[in-house]
Amino acid sequence: MTAVPAPVLAGSDSPHGPRPSVPGIPLRTQGDDAAAPERGKGSVQSLSSTGFRNLQLTRHALHPRLNLIAGPNGQGKTNVLEALALVSGRVSFRTSELLDTLAPGHREAAITVGTEAGVLAASLVEGKRAQLLEGRRITRAVAARHLPIVFLTGSDLTRLAGGPADRRRALDRLAAVLVPGYTAAYSRYEKARASRNRLLSGRRSPDADELSVYEDALAQSGASLVAGRRAAAARLSPALSREAAHLSSPYAPLVLSVQNDLGSLPESAVEAELRSRFLEGRSRERAAGRTLTGPHRDDVLLLADGNLDVATRASAGESRTLLLAWTLAEVALLTEALSRTPVLAFDDFDSEWDRTALAHFAEALPLDGQILLTSARPETVQSLPLGDGLLHRMEKGRITGTEALGAIRSRRLYSV
């Protein structure tokens, strides 16, 4: 098992400027994002955490297949999954403020994961995050490729019927893996949008030439986002339909449709159209103080029978079944794209879900993937076909005991 370094405060300089002091993670002076490999091997072997919420974990070992983290509410089960989200490059699914994740009295935190590819870590200092692999700075995108994890948490329950931002983010996460260059285009777009918004909201009238510079960047990167989302939706739609049918959803066939005012405009014409709209909208957007058109306003609808918006018809139970189908489809597509099965992290897996759909969901999971479940009722997992694993009992942020979960009936092999 890969050793996780003991807490050491260290800091050094790099050609890119001073490195932050990282609690619990020794830093190297060589290496940057360009040098970091983009592929690694699969599961979480061990987890350590200092200063993060109430977690007090030191090289806690996880089973390569099934891990059930059990305990009463408020003991830190969800904190474990949130820690894994941050160390794997994702944003927190509970807060947009990293300072909220620090334990009382702490100004910094470290999360360290042992994997077959090496030690992956996240440092949280003064509300900022640094991602590291073997002590070298990497980007969040590289971290996500080294430790791909598909999460299913309470925040996902409103994905289908809630606002468009959650659906956009879910599709963007998939596009980041399936579409080359998507992450870089997204970063360029958001940086250009922030700069243009700063000009639009300023006290002085913005310089037209300076606006044009940011609008060119928005149009170029925005066209890449439009193309990438369309491509990701085209890949996800048939996979989602297949999984929904397996879970006996009444809605089929299903299509994910990216909704914006560009309609079916050919991709070759999107950049010019966006540039024109940014220019024409300057007065209106100057009054609003922000950019009102572009891919950041897209919606993603799940349609059945061609044009039926499922969110307007599906019951709460049917929506949850479709969310399970979306999760299975995401796992399948990531497995295909990365040539390895992502980790599945499922919070409160037994609290909001139809038992029959949940059993079918468990049967459809790949046999070689690692699974992390949280629950207040550890006996519930015994009814699911998930195989051998470990039960980790959690109390006040600590794992107080670990025991083997009994072998459960054999299952069919899931084919991607």
Image: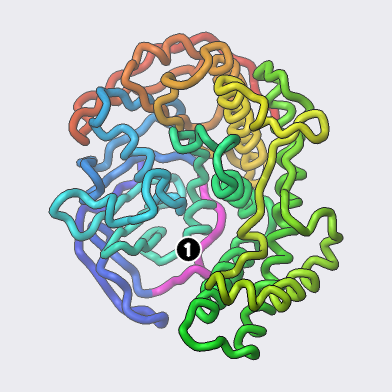
Figure coloring: rainbow
Instruction: Give the tally of numbered discs.
Output: 1
Q: In which quarter of the image is residue 14?
A: bottom left
Q: Is 169 located above or below residue 26 in the figure?
A: above
Residue at 80% x, 73% y is 272
Q: Magenta: predominant secondary structure element?
A: loop
Judge by depth and name the residue closer to the eye, 191 or 364.
191
Residue 186, position in %: x, y?
A: 60, 64
Residue at 71% x, 34% y is 309
Q: Is residue 213 left or right of residue 195?
A: right
Can residue 36 be found in the magenta stretch?
yes
Which element is circle 1 on?
Answer: loop
Judge by depth and name the residue closer to the eye, 296 or 61.
296
Q: Disc 1 marks which amino acid?
A: Thr
Q: Is 373 located above or below residue 84 in the figure?
A: above
Residue segment shown in magenta: 30-41
Residue at 24% x, 52% y is 102
Residue 121, position in %: x, y?
A: 36, 54
Q: In this view, does 248 lie to the left or right of 98?
A: right
Q: Is 260 located above or below residue 22 in the figure?
A: above
Residue 284, position in %: x, y?
A: 63, 72
Q: Is 372 located above or below residue 190 in the figure?
A: above
Residue at 59% x, 26% y is 319
Mark 1 nearby-residue class (10 Å; few <14, some 14–19, many ≥20): some
* Residue that badge 1 annotates: 139
Judge by depth and name the residue closer to the eye, 372 or 243.
243
Can residue 189 be found in the magenta stretch?
no
Q: In which quarter of the image is residue 260?
A: bottom right
Looking at the rendered image, the quarter that the C terminus falls into is top right
Looking at the rendered image, the quarter that the N terminus falls into is top left
Q: In which quarter of the image is residue 17?
A: bottom left
